[in-house]
Amino acid sequence: MSLRSLPPPLLRSLPLELPLALLAAWTLSACTVGPDYHGAPPVAKNAISSGTFVRAPADGITTTHAPAAWWKSLNDPQLDALIDAALAHNPDLHAAQAKLREARSQLRGEQANELPKLSADAAAVRMREPNTSALGSLFSSSSSSSASSSSSSSGSSGQGPLQLYTAGFDASWEIDLFGGTRRAIEAASDEADAVNADLADTQVSLAAEVAQTYISLRDQQQRFVLAQRSADYQQQMLTLTEQRRARGTAADVDVERLTTQVDTTRATLVPLDAQIAESLDQLAVLTGEAPGALDAQLSTLAPLPALPASVAIGDPTTMLQQRPDIRAAERRLASSNAQIGEHIADYFPKVSLLGDLGFTAGDPGHLLRKQNFTWVAVPYLQWNIFDFGRTGAKVHTAEASRDEAEAHYEHTVLAALQDANTALSRFGHQHEHLVRLEQVQTSSDRSATLMRQRYQAGVSTLIDLLDTQRSQFAAQQDVVAAQAELLKDFVSLQKSLGLGWQVAGT
């Protein structure tokens, strides 16, 4: 029942001091103790203000704004579908989303502490008093039996049962005079923002892990097919050599060398097959599926994704704004700062207003009459003057936590700059390495073709042919592995830039 809902006569019966007290309490509650948050401290100002990354390669890199869904630039629909499935069904992501809901619920709970508490009650009491005349007859003498009998008769027709009906509302409100509750709300709000950034960081890591696992799968499948083709070709050479030995034109040692090479090449298929199965199972789990669920979908051979012609990386300032782990560290610094004021408020008195509005009557039909209306308003002061340093210890603990959060923020920023520069350096060097390996492969292919022609013409030995084949096979394997490694470095670069979370939303 609100005050506005009461009849006018009852409103006139309330004292004028009550609304004035509420107004004064609201005015005093504007005070907030503790340090105000003015933002995170500057870190590595020179590195950020330069506008470029120290380790950025000269070729293949642009400073334009990088797209959030970086995997789209690889033009692989299968990869796009896997990342979308992971962002929708991954259990770790669901856990991060649940933690965000928990943090937001805690914030709503802190916000509710700033409001009054109101409860309603109603009761109906019915009670019969004991018959005092009958009890007194137990102590009367036998000579006055007639008087006692008359008294008992009179007592047996005593008063009827007592009836009482009540209904009302109780309210209590702790006035936030020194801002302790507001600081608690501020801390909870900042922590909810930090958990939201944790969710974004989970999305960044998840998209990168799916992409790197997918690239590993395609790399393993490519190298498995290369090894199979090489083994088949070597088996053909072995069969021809065995036929030549039977005609006396080849030696036993030639057959043994080819046999060894065939066995060695086939031996490489076993670990590759195991790695393929492991990658398939890892992709299934990342997308919220059971191991083996993606075998039919991904077992078919497919090429590696194609890198874009140029990679957009932005600048250090943009990177620091994009990375959710930096945002989480900054929000936790703000939350720790607010907790200092929350505990400083415990040094000061706490004032609460307690109130009760109600009706009391012996007849339910007369319950809401004016003369049966009652109210109580009680200001309540509580001040823990002597706590033997408990409040001070909490304040010092909160200050130390704030300093720790500030150091963690600085470390996070420096680590992010290192991560991005390292990823750029690896990407640039791996691209150069791939170019050189492709040159080696081209040369080995020409050598193998020429040596095969010379062997067939009878002007070179089988040993020379086997050497060129080994070199060709190794060059092909190296190029495929280098292409996959360059793609993984590209993924690591996108992760270091903090990309991949804006798409899924928070």
Image (cartoon, grey):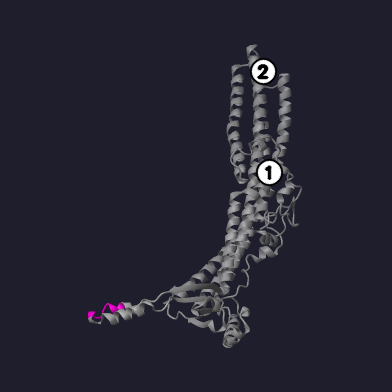
Structural crowding at the residue carrying mark 1, measured as other residues with C-alpha within 10 Å and reported as few (<14), some (14–19) or many (≥20): some
Per the model, the C-alpha gap separating discs 2 and 1 is 38 Å
Instruction: Examine the structure image and report whether residue 140 is included in the region drawn in magenta.
Output: yes
Split into 4 quadrants, where in the image is the C terminus? bottom right
Q: Residue 244's spot in the image, x, y percent?
A: 66, 15
- Say which quarter of the image contains residue 28: bottom right
Q: Residue 135's spot in the image, x, y percent?
A: 31, 77
Relative depth, front residue between 237 and 359: 359
Residue 433 got which mark? 1
Q: Which residues are magenta?
A: 135-142
Q: Residue 344's spot in the image, x, y percent?
A: 52, 76
Q: Is residue 263 left or right of residue 72?
A: left
Q: Residue at x 67, y 49 (%)?
A: 491
Question: Which residue is tagged 2?
Answer: 240
- Say which quarter of the image contains residue 373: bottom right
Is residue 273 among the parts visible in the rendering? yes
Q: Residue 310's spot in the image, x, y percent?
A: 75, 50
Check disc 2 and give the amino acid type: Leu
Relative depth, front residue between 46 and 352: 352
Structural crowding at the residue carrying mark 2, measured as other residues with C-alpha within 10 Å and reported as few (<14), some (14–19) or many (≥20): some
